[in-house]
Amino acid sequence: MLVVMQSSASEDKIQKVLEFIKQKGFDTHISKGEDHTVIGAVGSKIIDKRDIELLDGVKEVIRISSPYKLVSRVFKPNDTIIEVNGVKFGGGHVGMIAGPCSVESYEQVDATAQKLAKCGVKILRGGAFKPRTSPYAFQGLGEEGLKILREVADKYGMAVTSEVMEVGQIPLFLKYVDILQVGARNMQNFNLLRCLGEIRKPVLLKRGLSATIEELLMSAEYIVSGGNREVILCERGIRTFEPMTRNTLDISAIPVVQKISHLPIIVDPSHATGLRDKVAPMSKAAIAAGADGLIIEVHNSPETALCDGAQSLYPSDFAELYKDLQALSGIINKVCC
Amino acid sequence: MLVVMQSSASEDKIQKVLEFIKQKGFDTHISKGEDHTVIGAVGSKIIDKRDIELLDGVKEVIRISSPYKLVSRVFKPNDTIIEVNGVKFGGGHVGMIAGPCSVESYEQVDATAQKLAKCGVKILRGGAFKPRTSPYAFQGLGEEGLKILREVADKYGMAVTSEVMEVGQIPLFLKYVDILQVGARNMQNFNLLRCLGEIRKPVLLKRGLSATIEELLMSAEYIVSGGNREVILCERGIRTFEPMTRNTLDISAIPVVQKISHLPIIVDPSHATGLRDKVAPMSKAAIAAGADGLIIEVHNSPETALCDGAQSLYPSDFAELYKDLQALSGIINKVCC
Amino acid sequence: MLVVMQSSASEDKIQKVLEFIKQKGFDTHISKGEDHTVIGAVGSKIIDKRDIELLDGVKEVIRISSPYKLVSRVFKPNDTIIEVNGVKFGGGHVGMIAGPCSVESYEQVDATAQKLAKCGVKILRGGAFKPRTSPYAFQGLGEEGLKILREVADKYGMAVTSEVMEVGQIPLFLKYVDILQVGARNMQNFNLLRCLGEIRKPVLLKRGLSATIEELLMSAEYIVSGGNREVILCERGIRTFEPMTRNTLDISAIPVVQKISHLPIIVDPSHATGLRDKVAPMSKAAIAAGADGLIIEVHNSPETALCDGAQSLYPSDFAELYKDLQALSGIINKVCC
Amino acid sequence: MLVVMQSSASEDKIQKVLEFIKQKGFDTHISKGEDHTVIGAVGSKIIDKRDIELLDGVKEVIRISSPYKLVSRVFKPNDTIIEVNGVKFGGGHVGMIAGPCSVESYEQVDATAQKLAKCGVKILRGGAFKPRTSPYAFQGLGEEGLKILREVADKYGMAVTSEVMEVGQIPLFLKYVDILQVGARNMQNFNLLRCLGEIRKPVLLKRGLSATIEELLMSAEYIVSGGNREVILCERGIRTFEPMTRNTLDISAIPVVQKISHLPIIVDPSHATGLRDKVAPMSKAAIAAGADGLIIEVHNSPETALCDGAQSLYPSDFAELYKDLQALSGIINKVCC
């Protein structure tokens, strides 16, 4: 941490700031420049930099070290590769997850999964507990939904991912699910994150609608610092002033995250755009930008879907897109499966 | 709901859209204009309007009725007035809540509350469970914190509000707390909202960092539709591109909410700005714009606060501000206490 | 400027960075801390900090001094007070500007101005050249509009402000207008700003729809560095994801600007909200937060206005609001006229 | 336009609304539904919908037709293909533009262009008049810069694009430049747009930092309605809360624009990200999403560049990227040159 004093700061004020910082448990060293005296503060304590900025004579306080440790590339230079059912995320591998938004019935999941399995998809997605903006909307089948997912996935040799919405649901998810998904609205549900740090199954952590990349990494740090090292990050669009898409997919988050963190980052083009015909171009864009995977909504009959049918691909469209994505991956020296 | 057909839409396409809508449980009526055929659809079912927009020949689908019902002024034209410990929110009354960001010790809460009580404050705030971005930061005293709050509040004849972070904590809060606060990061924690609909104590619901006003009202609808009618809304700043304040306090949300909902709306200037010297001007602005209350962070010794000291007022500053706010309230024919 | 080296940076890399900085015309001094070596660079040259950040071994580059000079409080600690026709902006004075969005006819301006003059308003606003999103919308009366404004203003002893849209229009404006207004869309029309620095009439500079406060001050710096010290800043709402108001009025920009700059800052509640019934509460909020003035749209017959009638006040509503604002100003020890 | 009346609206109020609309020059037709009466209004007049929304008994006013006409796919279903120096934008063609941010000297432009020409680039970019946030920063060489660009381009058989900043500069640009570029900060400089509608050279129109896609199209409509049909749109990043990139490149704007407009849309990954190492991934993403072209900053010696060196590619990096982009274009059945 660097504390920049105002150019007018008296010796007395500088001393008071030094004392304050030391008292908070930091070692200090001073550098007197022509314009400004700068105090360096070294230590492992957490401090709110505004506390120092409010002291008399202080111009600015600058944090040097990152607030996240275990998820950073400085801590672990090599890519973390997460493998589920033979599918790898990270380290040159592009993992594919597909399936319906919500589990509606055994027949629906079975019909969809059969087609996905035929394309080569090995991880099935599907919501059993649904976070809905309206209390009057379909809220999901609950445990029944998880059972259906598991049964169908087993039938086709697939793994399963589904969204967990609260701490109390974790035991249920451990029973049925291979990857526990944390939704955008729960990215800063810190109790949930802490509990997910204690399990030993991969977590798919979605970026919040208005979360910065640093906050996404801090949320991952909650999980990893609890002992669970298998976190897959997911970019799913951020909220901006542009109304023509549901959200604005921040594709540049992919190379940004990959530079500063070793965790894999995948993209959800379905929720980001909210529009079926935008899913293919944005999937391709994500792969071209270096994404470590995709999670795509596919429904055997989008017109009758109980949730987000408008952004779900038809199985045939998905099959075609999947081939294009594999070709694209080849061009940038990656393997997509 | 209005379905606007493309000007080129054939009779056949119009029929298919009509059938689709009827099948979803809506009554329909058609209006053929010069340019566009418009289909009106009436019914109480929830439908994703994108499902219709994707049908052949449809230009646009427009929702007419609000997605929230019970919280709207159409449903209940008069202000909901919520009274806690003699303090009223709504209907011309401006309620005041004040206290430290976090409960750190009995002494700290006692020292702060004593001064607040002397000013006339009757509702004490304080965090026992703290949502922190970093897993390494102070996470609050937990139940011990709630006990301290209760004990101190009782000593000075005050009521207590504190933030509840998950479903499992609700019984604890019912024991110690008078108003249960839902933080911005939990505004769409739907499991929590649903459970808060079942209790019979007021809920203070904060707007999420990137939540629209409609979403805030939908979250309130979750609580009210569960049977708990006492919801106080709270504007606490939204996330924008402007870095000079922590968030951008959306003061215009006050008159906007008051026009469409009967629920009281208060303002949290401390979290919105993150800066002590901005708390007074923004508190005054909120009152002048018609806010039904304020929740302000005050700490007996901000320099040593474990959390958000930088945005906490000194008790003496608060005392002065409180007087100004009471004078301001008078000017706009409201009563502040 | 502070250049923080990576903890792993070799002596060789540090030397190369030092040389690079010196070559760019800066004096340097080094401070070796436990974790990081920090290089201080002092000089008046302008440098893009990313150029240094890309050098090998550099962790981060931190600008210490503000990019604006002449508009900052460091340069001039006392409020700049700008006086036009006896109305003062800044230094405890709240100036009022009112009038129609566009000049439509002599009769319309006359009817509006007469009522405003009766209320005590001494500065009349009105658009002659209109920046319209659509090429098919009413574009203003041009010079004819300026003439009308001048004539009516002279009749009632008022001053005039109107928006100048390009360099070529400046001579015309100098002939008819007392305050030259720069619209939000032109806040970074640097050619225009530079030319306005050469005139000797006050400039009312509106914040761009997505401009940061720092950028607003940099645009003011363009004008002031050209020699024209009379700049009135204007907050008029920024673009966010919230659709219920046209823009989000950033009331906190008022105290933020007042802390770092000596220039007066006023508020335009009409364009910020776009809704007549939100103008009064937001005007009051602005005054309560310490604004140095207001610019409000008033039209003698809003229903027939050619532009922005929806956000224009009726003269009678304005008269009532004006009284409230004067009372409010008194409470916070300011004078409004 | 559809006017939805409140469910409680009396017959009298409906009549008054009908009259108001007719008086504004629209034909009307009424549809009485169970809940709401809806009035359809047909006509070509421009009206501010808020004017009707403020009438008694009106619930909501919905615009059906797009505010842009000539640039929409409804007006012209086939892609507009713009060809400059043998390079095509649109209709399956991906055009490439490259060159330095600013023209600094003949030697610099020559050194850069020589390498670009060798790669096969046929359109050279370079700024002669620079829009700079700070009045103290390098403002460009002006006409001298345009001359250098022209001379070097002619030497290598290239075309030239450069940014025009104001109306007065247009004659100069017509003399030296093949594509006139409008910068993000001038996207709503309507005087400039109107004048560019009168010339007969292609215009490259950049999206403003906080402009919606609809506004971008409206600005293009200004140019096209003036008679100049050759407009190339350019996505260059929008302003969001994410600080890790200069702006957030809105890749989804590509398919969105291509669905509703016939004009080509290209991407500027250099300004969008502001970081050299993000240019390659975002260029690939843009092509994969279907962009009709790219404009990339390349400098023969980025470390000594006077402007934006940090985001400029080295010629060798560009050469490699260009090959990748050509391969990628092949995969999606496009031709890149």
Image (tube, coloured by chain):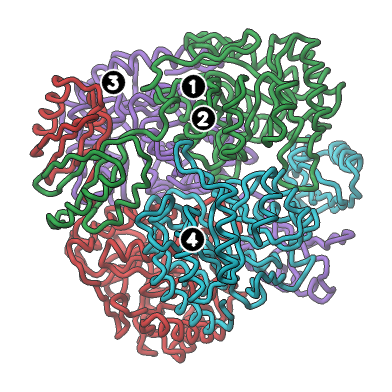
Chain colours: A red, B purple, C green, D cyan
How many other residues sit within 10 Å of disc 2, few (<14), some (14-19) or many (≥20)? many
Which is nearer the eye, C135 or D322? D322
Which residue lies at the image location 65% right of the left edge and 44% below the top edge? D166
**Image quadrant assignment for residue B1:** bottom right
Disc nearest the viewer among 3 and 4: 4
- C-alpha distance separating marks 2 and 3: 53 Å
Under mark 3, the amino acid is Gly
Disc nearest the viewer among 2 and 1: 2
* Tag 4 and tag 1 share a subunit: no
Q: Position of residue C159 (x, y in %)?
A: 70, 15
* Tag 3 and tag 1 share a subunit: no
Q: Secondary structure at mark 4?
A: helix
Residue B159 against residue D165 in the figure, above or below: above
- C-alpha distance separating marks 2 and 1: 9 Å
Q: Which residue is denoted by mark 2 in the rendering?
A: C220
**Image quadrant assignment for residue B232:** top left
| Left or right, B89 with reference to C305 | left
Which residue lies at the image location 76% right of the left edge and 75% below the top edge? B16
Q: Position of residue C68 (x, y in %)?
A: 42, 31
How many other residues sit within 10 Å of disc 3, few (<14), some (14-19) or many (≥20)? some
Chain ID, mark 1? C
Q: Which residue is denoted by mark 3 in the rendering?
A: B157
- C-alpha distance separating marks 4 and 1: 42 Å
Q: Secondary structure at mark 1?
A: loop
Chain ID, mark 3? B
Q: Decide: marks 2, 1 in contact (CB < 8 A)?
A: yes
